[in-house]
Amino acid sequence: MLIEAFDRVRLDGTGFDPITEVEVVAVVREAIAAGRGGRIVTPNIDILRQAQRDPAVRAYLDDAELIVADGMPLVWASRLGGNPLPERVAGSSLIRSLSSGLGRDGRSIFVIGGTPGAQDQVDGATRAAQRLAAENPGLRIAGTLCPAYGFEKDDSAYEKLCATVAEAEPDLVFVGLGFPKQESVVDRLRAALPRAWFMGCGAAVNFVAGDVERAPRWMQRSGLEWAHRLGTEPRRLAGRYLKHDAPYALKLLVQARRSV
């Protein structure tokens, strides 16, 4: 299966690959076997909105080999526009399905992110990696890192992080540092690991580690996962979700309907 086989679905200037989660895993496994690296970006409504005004966000999308829709409003807009995406493909799900696929091939992952461990406790990145390895026999853990807050402002700390990942030579790197910081890290790492795959996965590391509870499946399927996230982190997310993302989602749906 070749990445080029997918004709992208355009939503407000961004092309999305009309691809299922199962197909994403197949593409990545095939590419790794062939020695081809790549990058997966999983835009939601907020990222798509940012891409309209921020050249750096647009550059992350332009650099991606795979762009999949992590949000039901994006899937709904594609359907209203007459060029439907097959399903939502969430980074929070891909971290597990990709790990399963790589485990069948005896491949390795590197996990970055999670919550720091207090005193002698294991940090979130390590716990997430341990769970993924336990769930997927054959999966190798190349390494884990849970960088301190603000590490990106410390040149030596940033260089050390990149050197540690590069030395481990993983097949796939999950970077769960939040958008857009995680994509900046991917930018730095790609040159050093041209045969590796990378995915910025936001809160997925925390989900797998068990530090944050993901929304029930019915909320994920019905497009209400944002409501669950809002309920768990209202102070951080209320302004973004209600003031910015909701109006943009409505505009996107209206534009898609009018384009038919």
Image (tube, rainbow, N blue to C red):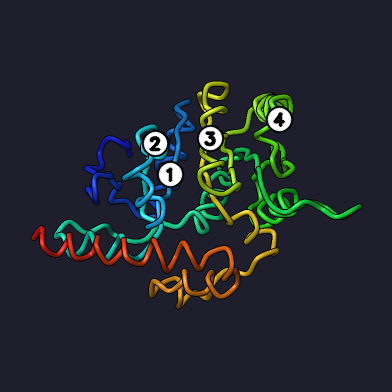
Q: Nearer the viewer, residue 129 or 205?
A: 205
Q: CA distance from mark 1 to mark 2?
A: 6 Å
What's the distance in space between the residues labelled 4 and 3, CA to CA?
A: 14 Å
Query: Under tag 2, what secondary structure?
Result: loop
Relative image position of residue 260 (x, y in whole percent): 8, 60
According to the picture, the residue beneath numbered tag 2 turns out to be 64
Instruction: Pick whichever of labels 4 and 1 is earlier in the sequence.
Output: 1
Q: Horizontal and vertical percent for residue 136?
A: 63, 53
Residue at numbered disc 3: 184
The image's mark for residue 154 is 4
Q: Earlier in the sequence, mark 3 or mark 2?
A: 2
Give the foreground label among 1 and 3.
Answer: 3
Q: Nearer the viewer, residue 172 or 125?
A: 125
Q: Which of the two discs, 2 and 4, labels the residue nearer the N terminus?
A: 2
Q: Are marks 1 and 2 in contact (CB under 8 Å)?
A: yes
Q: Name the residue at the right extreme.
A: 120
- Nearest to N terminus: mark 1 or mark 2: 1
Amino acid tagged 2: Ala
> How far apart, in angstroms, are the residues tagged by discs 1 and 3?
12 Å
Residue type at mark 4 is Asp
